[in-house]
Amino acid sequence: MTERALVLLPTYNEKDNIEKISRQVIAIDPRIEVLIVDDNSPDGTGQIADRLSAENPRIKVLHRADKQGLGRAYVAGFHYGIEQKYDYIFEMDADFSHQPKYLTDHLKNIQTCDISLGSRYIKGGGVENWPKTRWAISYYANVYSRVVTGLPVRDATGGFKCFRRRVLESLDLDNIRSNGYSFQIEVSFRAWLHGFKIRETPIVFIEREAGHSKFSKKIIYEAVFMVLYLGIQSIPFRVKRLFGFGKK
C-alpha cells in the first residue's frame, strides 16, 4: 500500500500565498496531500482554499469559526490526519518561510526516526532576511529551552516538522497547553518523554515576503513560562536517566 502524507497549512489572512504554496507542495511528491486549516480569514483566504479544493482532490480545507491560534489550528489538523489514517503528518507555514523543497528531505529523514524536525541551527541550516535582534531572540530561546527542559534538539521552536502518525496518536492532543510558538516546544517535548526519536534535518528559514508576521511579545512571554513549566515536568524523567533508573 502506498504511503500517504498530509501537509497542514494553518492560515489567517494568507490570500497572497495560499494558492502558490499549495500547488508547490503537492507538486513535490505524489504521496503528499494538503489540508488548509483556515481561521475564518477576513481577506478571503478560505474562499481561495475552497476553489483550490474543488479543482484538486489532493487539497483539502478545514474551516474554523474564528482565530483561535496556531496551536489549536495544528491540533485540529492532527485530529484530521489521524482520523484519515495518513502515515505522515507535517507542520508547515503557509508563507514560504518554510520552503517546499525540504519536504523531500523530511520524507527521507522520517524513515529512520519518529519526528523529522527542520532545524535552522545545525550544520547546513540557517535564516535569511532576519534582523540580528530577531535571530538572537530565536537562537537563545532555543538554548534556554534545551537547558531547562533537556529536550535534545537544537531548534525546539522550529515549526517545519514531519510526524509519524503513531506519535500524534500517543499524545493527549486536546490537553496541550501552548498555542503560540511554544506549541512547537511542548509537542516535541511530550513526544520525547514518550520515548520517540527526533532527528533534525537542516533547513534555511526565509522571512516572509507577503503578508504579516504573527511574531509578538505575547508569544515570547508564553514561551518563557511554558519552558519553565515543561522543565519542572522533566525533572523526574531526567533524574531517572541520570542515575540509570528503569534500565533493563
Image (tube, grey):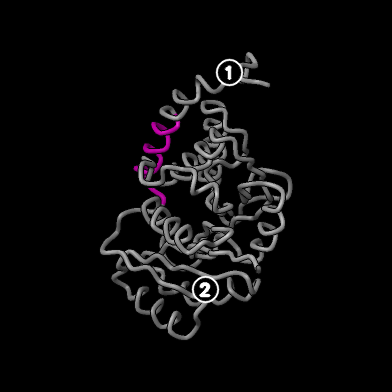
Q: Return the x and y of residue 77 as percentages of the image width and height.
A: 43, 59
Residue at which label 1 appears: 240
**Tag count:** 2
Residue 139 falls in image quadrant: top right
Q: Does the magenta run of residues contain 122?
A: no
**Quarter containing the N terminus:** bottom right
Q: Amino acid at mark 1?
A: Lys
For marks 1 and 2, give the one nearer the viewer: 1
SS category of the residue bearing label 2: helix
171 or 68, nearer to the observer: 171
Q: Which residues are magenta?
A: 215-227
Q: Identify the residue at horizontal 45%, vertical 30% (top origin).
A: 230
140 or 79, nearer to the observer: 79
Residue at which label 2 appears: 22
Q: Identify the residue at horizontal 49%, vertical 43% (top origin).
A: 170
Q: Return the x and y of residue 228 as percentages of the image width and height.
A: 43, 27
47 or 196, nearer to the observer: 196
Q: Return the x and y of residue 144 as percentages of the image width and height.
A: 53, 30
**Quarter containing the C terminus:** top right
Q: Does the magenta run of residues contain 222?
A: yes
SS category of the residue bearing label 1: helix
The crowd level at tag 1 (other Cα within 10 Å; few <14, some 14-19, many 20+) is few
Tags 1 and 2 touching, CB below 8 Å: no
Q: Identify the residue at horizontal 62%, vertical 76% (top origin).
A: 27
Q: Main secondary structure of the magenta part?
A: helix
**Which badge, 1 or 2, comes first in the chain's sequence?**
2
The answer to whether residue 70 is left or right of residue 17 is left
Q: Amino acid at mark 2?
A: Ser
